[in-house]
Amino acid sequence: SGGLSVLKLSHAAERGAIEFQNAILDHIAEADPACIIPRLAKARDGSELVSVADAVGRPCCARVLSYVQGRPLHMMTLE
């Protein structure tokens, strides 16, 4: 889409949790397209999660999400 992106690497053992997070993001995007959330990029084969190895050869899961400008929740003041 031409905007900024974030590459996220996760331990391979977390794959199930990452797939669940991806499913939630997909559901929100489908239910409310105007909602400002990170959008998942798809690999050439259409997948949203790719198996890779880190710099020392450990298995990881990689995904790319669109960058959403904002402040981290821990920096917000609750009223």
Image (cartoon, rainbow, N blue to C red):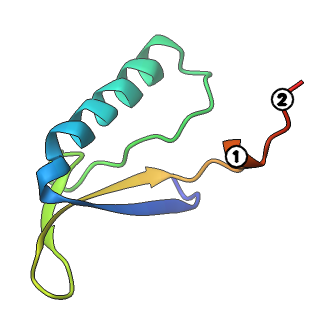
Front residue of this view, candidates 57 and 36: 57
Position of residue 43 relative to residue 74, above or below, is below
Q: Which residue is mark 1?
A: 74
Query: Which kind of residue does numbered mark 2 sit on?
Result: Leu
Question: Residue at position x 70%, y 46% from top?
Answer: 74
Front residue of this view, candidates 58 and 28: 58
For the residues labelled 1 and 2, say whether their Cβ atoms are less than 8 Å apart.
no
Residue 36: which disc?
none
Q: Horizontal and vertical percent for residue 2?
A: 55, 58
Q: Quadrant of the C terminus?
A: top right
Q: Residues within 10 Å of mark 2 (few under 14, many from 20)?
A: few
Q: Horizontal and vertical percent for residue 43?
A: 23, 54
Question: Residue at position x 83%, y 29% from top?
Answer: 78
Query: Which kind of residue does numbered mark 1 sit on?
Result: His
Position of residue 66 relative to residue 36, above or below, is below
Q: Horizontal and vertical percent for residue 41?
A: 36, 49
Residue 78: which disc?
2
Q: Residue furthest top?
A: 31
